[in-house]
Amino acid sequence: MSEKAQNKEQKEKGFPTVDDRPDRAVLVAVIRDGQDPRQAEEFLDELEFLAETAHIETVRRFTQRLPQPSSRIYVGPGKLEEISVYCKEHEIDVVIFDDELSPSQTRNIEQAMPCRLLDRTRLILDIFLQRAQTAYAKTQVQLANYEYMLPRLAGMWTHLERQRGGTGTRGGAGEREIETDRRIVRGRITKLKEDLKKIDRQMAVQRSNRGSLVRVALVGYTNVGKSTLMNLLSKSEVFAENKLFATLDTTVRKVVFDNLPFLLSDTVGFIRKLPTELVESFKSTLDEVREADLLLHVVDISHPQFEDQIAVVKQTLQEIGAGDKPVFLVFNKVDAYTYIKKEEDDLTPITRENLSLDDLKKSWIAKANTPCIFLSALEKTNIEKFRSDLYGMVREIHAGRYPFNNFLY
């Protein structure tokens, strides 16, 4: 029986086929000098979650401590050989690196690997390409993808290196093919940028037609529960899933609290080492954030690195010109928060893992000037208090904008 017929028979019986099975991958990361190994493992946890989102199964992780990643092959020669041998023996489909690789690093590593190669940026771009639904999102992701590809085209044509002219010049068919592809890609980049400008103008008109309603934007790290909170507040059906980058398009809904209307928008989530190409191409989508009157910064309090995630979001907000907006910190997923209680005779220093939720509330969070709340959007814990606090903030902004309309509420 042929493989095609076998796949058909398995599919009819409800069994997974060869095509349905996820690719098998190993993850590779460098632990820098001074970096906590636990932090490196948590970064790899995130990379594994990214791989899972892209329908890739992680089989093993490889790490190596170095002052900095090798400029030639990212890891040391011995470690690269170890990874290569493992991939060959265990029939691994793809190797994923937890950093963006330079074009030269990619070419050098590919020569040693018996399987496909992905870096963190390529993986995130692939996820965005899979999840983009609207024409706007697809245009933005395609632009980012082509800008990533452009400096790496030479590596895609290494099989043409032997096709050079016989006169000693470097003008053979392989090089002509690369130059042709570069012109095609540059042309597509120019066309996509023009398309984005047209869509941006249309969206700017849409925003201007909304009047002067108070605008509130949900921001935060990816997979912290923004869309779930959006559905809860606006009683809408925004797609929400326990996957990274479930939402790519900005969704705007009109919400009314006690006769007080405002606009609530849900935006794409941020992530550590978000590719520069994506930040640039999605800046127009994030106009909703830049034009917002109030930012609801949603945080997954159950995540062990939630403080780092807060820092990533703050940095990204600065990069897109929204770092000075009023912020309401929303600590979500209190139902999933866990900690390790220290024994009374344990004299080791207290760490973040030993803090209860009450202890955490009394930490730097209590000393910060930023208003905050602890809740669970999934379990609807403390939602009424959240609605009341949000209502008060929106009302204050509305009253400042329309001082003679306060009788409405």
Image (cartoon, grey):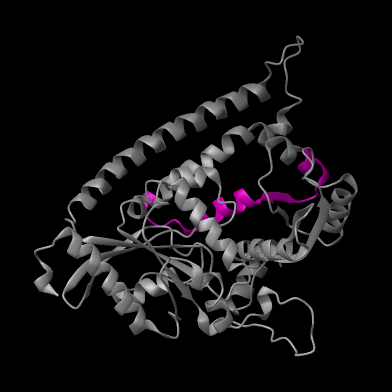
Q: Is residue 282 left or right of residue 81?
A: left
Residue sitting at 73 percent across and 19 percent down?
164
Q: Residue furthest right?
A: 78
Q: Is residue 192 left or right of residue 389?
A: right
Question: Is the residue 195 above or below the residue 375 in the image?
Answer: above
Q: Is residue 309 left or right of residue 403?
A: right
Query: Would residue 304 be counted in the magenta stretch?
Result: no
Q: Quadrant of the C terminus?
A: bottom left
Q: Nearer the viewer, residue 7 or 395?
A: 395
Q: Residue 63's x, y, as percent?
A: 80, 57
Q: Residue 150's x, y, as percent?
A: 57, 34
- Majority secondary structure of the magenta segment? helix
Q: Residue 325's x, y, as percent?
A: 37, 55
Which residues fall within the magenta stretch?
A: 108-136
Question: Is the residue 176 above or below the residue 357 in the image?
Answer: above
Evaluate whether residue 8 shows in this view.
yes
Residue sitting at 52 percent across and 78 percent down?
361
Q: Residue 21's x, y, as percent?
A: 66, 67
Q: Is residue 39 left or right of residue 188?
A: right
Q: Residue furthest top?
A: 167
